[in-house]
Amino acid sequence: MKKSFLNANTPFITEMVQVKTDKAAEYKIQNAVADGATAIGLQINFLERQYRTEEILTTVFEKAENKPIYITNYRDKESQGMTDSELMEQLLLGLKCGATLVDVMGDTFDPSPEELTTDEKAIAKQMQFIDEVHKRGGEVLMSSHIKEFRSPERVLEVALEQQRRGTDIVKIVTGAETQEEELVNLEICNLLKKELKVPFLFLSGGKYSYLHRTVGPALGTCMWLCFREYDDTTYAGPPLLSNVLKIKQGLKL
């Protein structure tokens, strides 16, 4: 039986895998599991299309050793040019192959500012897709990559709208270019914890995002997104897996 991302007693330590080939994904996953990752995030949009088959993805996911698997398939990288319907079909394939949690962009079927459509037809299609994932035993995270600082009121508004659409986990990525923005983002974590009925993953990018990404789980964020190492397939935004393990121990989470 697949392990769930919901109702966990402690935040997951999720190793994000951003590679082009199946073998590279297998190695990344095996190394991360051996070093203490408690969940795996495979970004299918980085994977070359010839490796997106049922046989290959099943083999890749087996390397997670029953750790829960989160998958994305955004419109960039190797998925550029694909329709949103095609992206969603590959998420369903990933679910069939062993993934638990699929990432549905908040503007799926209608690319929009802040990755959150207001088009009622697109929203209805999103909700139908979420229902289909649930029928197949999967879980849904809805994501809005805003990538710029937003007020607490706006972040909560986006979060509540994602929740209304039936997602199991809310995900919002904003920004922090000043220390003041970083501190507000930490306060927003507490706001979301109070106001949402579902788990949330609230992150930020920018010059002052590292503290938010490292202590967010102590304030209610449901998981860390991290890398086992920095190399040509990663970037120095998320914390390293080894540091997260120390932080989690220090925070007693």
Image (cartoon, rainbow, N blue to C red):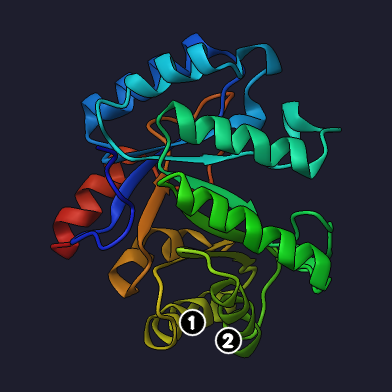
Residue at 33%, 19% in the rendered image: 63
The x and y percentages for residue 135 are 47, 50
Residue at 46%, 63% in the rendered image: 169
Q: Quadrant of residue 27?
A: top left
Q: Quadrant of residue 32?
A: top left
Q: Which one is in front, 118 or 93?
A: 93
Is 121 left or right of 3, judged from the image as shown? Answer: right
The amino acid marked with disc number 1 is Ile
Of labels 1 and 2, earlier in sequence is: 2
Residue 50 visible in this rendered orientation of the protein: yes
Q: Number of marks in the image?
A: 2
The x and y percentages for residue 25 are 47, 19
The crowd level at tag 1 (other Cα within 10 Å; few <14, some 14-19, many 20+) is: many
Q: Which residue is mark 2?
A: 152
The amino acid marked with disc number 2 is Pro
Q: Residue furthest front?
A: 135
Residue at 54%, 69% in the rendered image: 166
Label annotation for residue 113: none
Is 63 left or right of 192, judged from the image as shown? Answer: left
**Vertical side of 36 occupied by 198: above or below:** below
Label annotation for residue 188: 1
Q: Quadrant of residue 91?
A: top right
Q: Are marks 1 and 2 in contact (CB under 8 Å)?
A: yes
Quarter of the picture holding the C terminus: bottom left
The x and y percentages for residue 6 are 32, 59
The x and y percentages for residue 9 are 18, 61
Is 117 left or right of 193, judged from the image as shown? Answer: right
The crowd level at tag 2 (other Cα within 10 Å; few <14, some 14-19, many 20+) is: some
Numbered disc 1: secondary structure: helix
